[in-house]
Image (cartoon, rainbow, N blue to C red):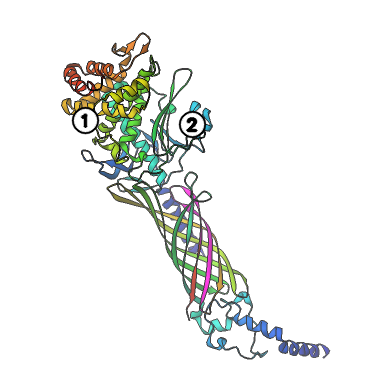
């Protein structure tokens, strides 16, 4: 009887130990995610990535914000995006692997991938420009940043839910502070890499966040044409930073193979694109953005991709002092103005940069 | 004397009564969850002295204790069942807050005492989720044992209740566009109450329906119920 009791105790202790030994530690950990192989096109590897800013893997929260979900349609609850309240954490499941924790269900993988992309984006931008080092510059950054997985939103009332997309959504409070939302929408028809797992696409979204946080006057545009031009410029810059993060100028095609978003393919600012930016008719910000991204890819090949990234990042954070886009207290954006601000930020490489811009902007009347 | 006479009359009445004879036959054939001995396949004329009505609760699959003692192998059945196992998850569920795994298990059912059964088992369950070209597959290999008590025996059915304890090794595997799969494993232990319903469908086979409600201990504690159905074959 005593022996049975003793063995029973050992058994229980062993089981408890087995359970406890699997506990996920807090603090930075390595997590296995899908990572692009630098220099390869749409080739990936699944490997452990150290998430240095992560504080709690179970809740996927860290110094860069928190991966969250929301029950139902976010737009039906407008106060949610205005206040950041009402979100909840993913019920994650991870098991320990040889090179990091491995998600054992898809949403855990998605959540970890979203945080990973946010951290890669943060590190990239902080390296390029100290003004974008939000962790050192802004102690409130984590509290006002959310990464929403599988969000349900509608473009307009009565419209179907947005799917197969990703978005950066800023919510500006009355006091001027911005709540940052990096949003991944549910996958519906995509048969390639889901957006949330495409590092380039999520760094693209993080780059929108950077632009709006380092350039607080983002909303102060002089007119509609400026607003349309700024949106296209924002898309183009984001595509370029997505390329820098992945080393793959075709990262967008890994998810949308049919789109004309290959940065290596030269693109001209045609008169049709130029006119659409002037009038808003048949306008697609990504179309003009793709032109700017391809221009910058060529500039990157000429002066070095990282060097060009630094110049672009510096331009973003110093737009408020660039006379080529500023008119009084408002801003008039155009591709020509951006070319001049970019060249100004690039210093000694200015002439080289202007030359490449000119080649692609002149055709459609962009200059 | 009068009392003895009364008992004798009652015994004789029961012995010739058709309903008693039927009941006695059912006592031998009621729940054919295992092959009945050859002698039982050819029902003998009911003799009061020979028919010691088996207490239904004390027999294995309807066989009397006497029969079981004469052939101990009859207390052993082997089976296979397929079904689903759910793991509670608040944000990703297939049904009622559960992630559903599908698979099956082999098991044996052994009578160790009257009405008490031990059921060791070995199983495999899987769940795959994917979006586009990326996916996550969870594999669960489990080995466990259940202890059951027969709480009810009907004409062709028997209900057991008890508990199961299983050790499981969960493997997670990620795949993505043009990339290699990658896997890692974790041991978990789960235990909880269980019940098993067996319904005889032939002298050798019974249909079984097993349900359990385990608590799994891993890096998080989760409710993990299961439901499986299959066949059990009683070794001769």
Residue A305's image quarter? top left
- Farthest residue toward the right? B2
B85 above or below B176? below
Using the image, determine if residue A304 lies above or below residue A199: above
In this rendering, position of residue A216 left or right of residue B215: left
- Badge 2 or badge 1: first in the primary sequence: 2
Residue B93 in the image: state x and y as whole percent: 48, 48
Asked if residue B213 lies in the magenta stretch, the reply is: yes
Provide the secondary structure element on which disc 2 rests.
loop
Residue A59 located left or right of residue A200: right
Mark 2 sits on what residue? A156
Percent across and percent down for residue A194 are: 36, 42
| Residue found 43% across the figure and 47% down from its top | B219
* Identity of the residue furthest to the top in this view: A328
Q: Chain of mark 1?
A: A
Task: Judge whether residue B162 can be spotted in this image.
Answer: yes
The answer to whether residue A316 is left or right of residue A347 is right
- Tell which of B91 and A320 is nearer to you: A320
Quick one: A234 or B183, which is closer to the camera?
A: A234
Would you place residue B17 above or below residue B139 in this image?
Answer: below
Same-subunit check for callouts 2 and 1: yes
Tag on residue B35? none
Instruction: State if disc 1 and disc 2 touch (CB < 8 Å).
Output: no
Q: Residue visible at 55% across and 70% down?
A: B198
Considering the image in quadrants, where does the N terminus of chain B appear? bottom right
What chain does badge 2 belong to?
Answer: A
Give the residues in magenta: B204-227
Q: Is residue B156 magenta?
A: no
Residue matched to label 1:
A266
Give the alpha-carbon distance from disc 2 to disc 1, as whole Å. Answer: 35 Å
Residue B166: image location, x then y, percent: 46, 60
Q: What is the crowding at mark 1: few (fewer than 14 residues within 10 Å), some, or many (at least 20)?
A: some
């Amino acid at each position: 009887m005593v022996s049975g009791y003793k063995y029973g105790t050992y058994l229980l202790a062993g089981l408890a130990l087995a359970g406890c030994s699997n506990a996920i530690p807090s603090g930075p950990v390595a997590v296995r995610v899908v990572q692009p192989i630098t220099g390869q096109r749409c080739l990936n590897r699944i490997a452990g990535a150290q998430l240095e800013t992560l504080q709690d893997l179970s809740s996927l929260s860290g110094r860069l914000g928190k991966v969250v979900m929301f029950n139902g349609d976010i737009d039906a609850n407008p106060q949610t995006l205005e206040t950041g309240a009402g979100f909840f954490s993913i019920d994650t499941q991870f098991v320990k692997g040889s090179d990091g924790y491995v998600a054992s269900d898809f949403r855990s993988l998605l959540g970890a991938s979203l945080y990973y992309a946010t951290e890669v984006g943060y590190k990239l931008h902080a390296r390029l420009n100290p003004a974008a080092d939000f962790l050192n510059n802004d102690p409130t950054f984590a509290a006002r940043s959310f990464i929403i997985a599988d969000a349900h939103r509608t473009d307009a009332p009565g419209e179907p839910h947005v799917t197969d997309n990703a978005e950066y959504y800023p919510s500006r409070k009355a006091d001027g502070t911005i709540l940052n939302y990096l949003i991944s929408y549910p996958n519906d028809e995509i048969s390639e890499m889901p957006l949330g797992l495409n590092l380039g696409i999520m760094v693209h979204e993080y780059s929108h966040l950077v632009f709006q946080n380092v350039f607080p006057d983002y909303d102060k545009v002089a007119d509609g044409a400026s607003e349309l031009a700024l949106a296209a410029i924002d898309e183009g810059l984001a595509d370029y930073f997505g390329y820098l993060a992945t080393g793959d100028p075709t990262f967008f095609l890994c998810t949308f193979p049919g789109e004309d978003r290959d940065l290596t393919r030269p693109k001209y600012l045609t008169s049709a694109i130029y006119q659409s930016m002037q009038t808003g008719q048949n306008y697609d910000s990504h179309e003009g953005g793709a032109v700017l991204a391809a221009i910058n890819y060529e500039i990157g090949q000429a002066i070095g991709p990282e060097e060009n990234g630094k110049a672009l990042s510096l331009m973003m954070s110093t737009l408020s002092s660039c006379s080529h886009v500023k008119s009084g207290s408002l801003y008039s954006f155009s591709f020509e103005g951006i070319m001049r601000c970019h060249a100004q930020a690039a210093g000694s490489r200015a002439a080289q940069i202007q030359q490449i811009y000119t080649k692609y902007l002149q055709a459609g009347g962009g200059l | 004397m009068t009392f003895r006479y009364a008992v004798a009359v009652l015994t004789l009445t029961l012995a010739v009564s058709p309903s008693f004879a039927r009941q006695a036959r059912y006592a031998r054939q009621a729940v054919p969850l295992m092959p009945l001995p050859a002698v039982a396949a050819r029902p003998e004329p009911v003799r009061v002295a020979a028919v010691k009505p088996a207490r239904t609760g004390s027999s294995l699959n309807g066989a009397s204790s006497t029969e079981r003692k004469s052939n101990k192998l009859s207390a052993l059945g082997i089976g296979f069942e397929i079904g689903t196992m759910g793991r509670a998850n608040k944000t990703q569920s297939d049904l009622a807050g559960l992630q559903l795994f599908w698979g099956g298990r082999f098991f044996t059912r052994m009578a160790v005492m009257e009405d008490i059964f031990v059921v060791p088992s070995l199983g495999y369950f899987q769940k795959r989720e994917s979006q586009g070209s990326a996916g996550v597959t969870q594999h669960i290999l489990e080995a466990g044992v259940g202890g059951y008590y027969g709480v009810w025996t009907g004409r062709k059915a028997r209900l057991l209740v008890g508990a199961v304890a299983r050790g499981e090794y969960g493997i997670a595997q990620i795949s993505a566009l043009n990339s290699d799969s990658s896997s890692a494993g974790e041991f978990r232990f789960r235990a909880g109450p269980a019940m098993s319903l067996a319904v005889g469908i032939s002298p050798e086979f019974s249909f079984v329906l097993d349900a359990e409600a385990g608590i799994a201990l891993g890096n998080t504690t989760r409710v993990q119920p299961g439901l499986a159905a299959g066949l059990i074959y009683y070794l001769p």
